[in-house]
């Protein structure tokens, strides 16, 4: 079945360091891929997405490229800030109904802690 | 932006009691809501899909008589964990669909003693 594997945390970085959080997936067909972020005490929020191979999703300085050949969707940011401290979830959806996602399959989440 | 409110954020209960978790869409109507569960170091797993005015659709392996879902209005879905046991201790999170987007609640940490 479809699945998502992401690196275990916590990831601890100093401010302005480069961030990579690895995410790989297993899926039949052509899934859409997502990164969600959960700040302390808040709900998950969509950070970025990509719907087809070679697409690059980007938002708030974060980027991820849909790599079909390596079945990966790694999250990157060139210079992290303390405010980026959160839990990051990689997810895929194998169904897209009129643009609305239906069933999401999540990774385990990766806690990022950025120190000043 | 759209907000989903989930309550309570944390609950501790005795084994054998029932616990109700509420999920509300605050500024939009959600015909469909989803309930997820996450055990420590594991993925968020979809438990069930809740449709307003009809029975919920449960994922394989999820006991519908244990996890009662009621979606009585377009802004409220509830999950009741009946006769909770320590193995039900987990993080529960809901989401609601507004047209093209999914919005998530902040989650409920359930601890059953």
Image: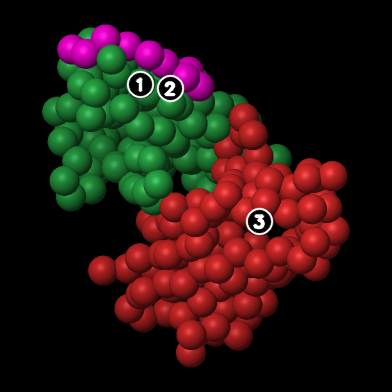
Chain colours: A red, B green
Give whichever of A85, A49 is nearer the camera: A85
Which residue is the site of mark 1? B111
x, y percent for residue A78:
80, 67
Q: Are marks 3 and 2 in contact (CB under 8 Å)?
A: no
Which residue is the site of mark 2? B22
Q: Tag 3, which secondary structure?
A: strand
Q: Chain of mark 3?
A: A
x, y percent for residue B53:
31, 32
Q: Chain of mark 2?
A: B
Which residue is the site of mark 3? A47
Q: CA distance from mark 1 to mark 2?
A: 16 Å
Query: Is B6 placed above or below A103 here?
Result: above
Q: Residue A110 got which mark?
A: none
Q: Tag 1, which secondary structure?
A: strand
Assign the N terminus of chain A to one quadrant of the image.
bottom left
Magenta span contains residue A84 = no
């Amino acid at each position: 079945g479809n699945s998502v594997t992401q690196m275990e945390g916590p990831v601890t970085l100093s401010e302005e360091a480069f961030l990579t959080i690895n995410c790989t997936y297993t899926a039949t067909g052509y899934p859409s891929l997502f990164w969600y972020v959960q700040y302390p005490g808040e709900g998950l929020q969509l950070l970025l997405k990509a719907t087809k191979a070679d697409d690059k999703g980007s938002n708030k300085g974060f980027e991820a490229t849909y790599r079909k050949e390596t079945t990966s969707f790694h999250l990157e940011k060139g210079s992290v800030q303390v405010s980026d401290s959160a839990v990051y979830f990689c997810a895929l959806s194998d169904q897209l109904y009129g643009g609305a996602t239906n069933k999401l399959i999540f990774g385990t989440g990766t806690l990022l802690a950025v120190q000043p | 932006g759209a907000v989903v409110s989930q309550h309570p954020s944390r609950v501790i209960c005795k084994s054998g009691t029932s616990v109700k978790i509420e999920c509300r869409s605050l500024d939009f109507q959600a015909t469909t809501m989803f309930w997820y569960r996450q055990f420590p170091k594991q993925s968020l797993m979809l438990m069930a899909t809740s449709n307003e005015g009809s029975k919920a659709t449960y994922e394989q392996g999820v006991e519908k008589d244990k996890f009662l879902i009621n979606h009585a209005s377009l802004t409220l879905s509830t999950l009741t964990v009946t006769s909770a046991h320590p193995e039900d201790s987990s993080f529960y999170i809901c989401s609601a669909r507004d047209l093209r987007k999914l919005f998530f609640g902040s989650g409920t940490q359930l601890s059953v003693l």
